[in-house]
Image (cartoon, rainbow, N blue to C red):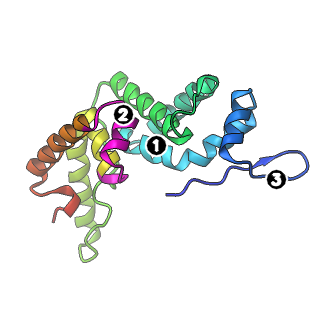
Amino acid sequence: MQALRPTIWDGAQVVDPPETELIARARAGDARAFTALVRSHDDAMRGLAYSLLGSRTAMDDALQDAYVKAYRAIGSFRGSAAFGTWLHRIVRNTCIDHLRRSNRHREVSLELIVSNPDPAAGADERLAERSRVGAALAALSDEQRCVVVLVDRDGCSYDDAAQLLGITPGTVASRLSRARSTLRATLGADPREGTR
């Protein structure tokens, strides 16, 4: 998914400043620049939060917390990673914090893995399959669910997922292997190939 182009009304015209300029302005305290930065990444962050939390209410709560954290921390943004990567990490960590605080299983997005349902299957069959996959994903640990979402759903490389999660690529590979093994045992097939 391509990020939206940030726009700011400067009083006379709509301006599309480059992200580096928006970052500099946000670091200097310009709330409108920060808002434009967040808006340009909001769809991706919403997808991540919903995938991890499984509820729109929880997603909205976590995103509000994450965006406040990011706003407070923008002054310390070093630029060693892309702004989207930095924001992704804040959102991911905030979602994990919300999961830990809730201390209960969540219904995970039903579209996480089964993104291309069998067109010949009836609506009831597709709904049952999505529910089954959602329950299997909800049963994974937070760490395993995160790597499944990043690698299998979002298409991140192991290196990118490792950077976002603050772990090594080898840890990504081992968590993903364990998660896929658990999903195969639960669902009876590799969830990336569909479970029919």
The quadrant of the image that shows the C terminus is bottom left
| Circle 1 residue | 56
Q: In front of the other: label 1 or label 3?
A: 3
Residue 156 is one of the magenta-drawn residues: yes
* x 45%, y 33%: residue: 89
* x 64%, y 24%: residue: 75
Say which element carries label 2: helix
The amino acid pointed to by label 2 is Leu
Disc 1 and disc 2: Cα gap in Å?
A: 23 Å
| Circle 3 residue | 14
The amino acid pointed to by label 1 is Arg
Where does residue 132 sit, x and y in percent of width and height?
Answer: 20, 52
The amino acid pointed to by label 3 is Val
Disc 1 and disc 3: Cα gap in Å?
A: 31 Å
Say which element carries label 1: helix
Residue 95 is one of the magenta-drawn residues: no
Horizontal placement of 177 versus 70: left or right? left
| Circle 2 residue | 165
Where does residue 62 sit, x and y in percent of width and height?
Answer: 48, 32
Q: Which residues are magenta?
A: 152-169
- How many other residues sit within 10 Å of disc 1, few (<14), some (14-19) or many (≥20)? some
Horizontal placement of 10 versus 171: left or right? right
> What kind of secondary structure does the magenta stretch mostly adopt?
helix
Tell me if residue 112 can be seen. Answer: no
Say which element carries label 3: strand
**Where residue 129 is drawn, which disc sits there?**
none
Where does residue 179 sit, x and y in percent of width and height?
Answer: 18, 42
Toward the right, the furthest residue is 12
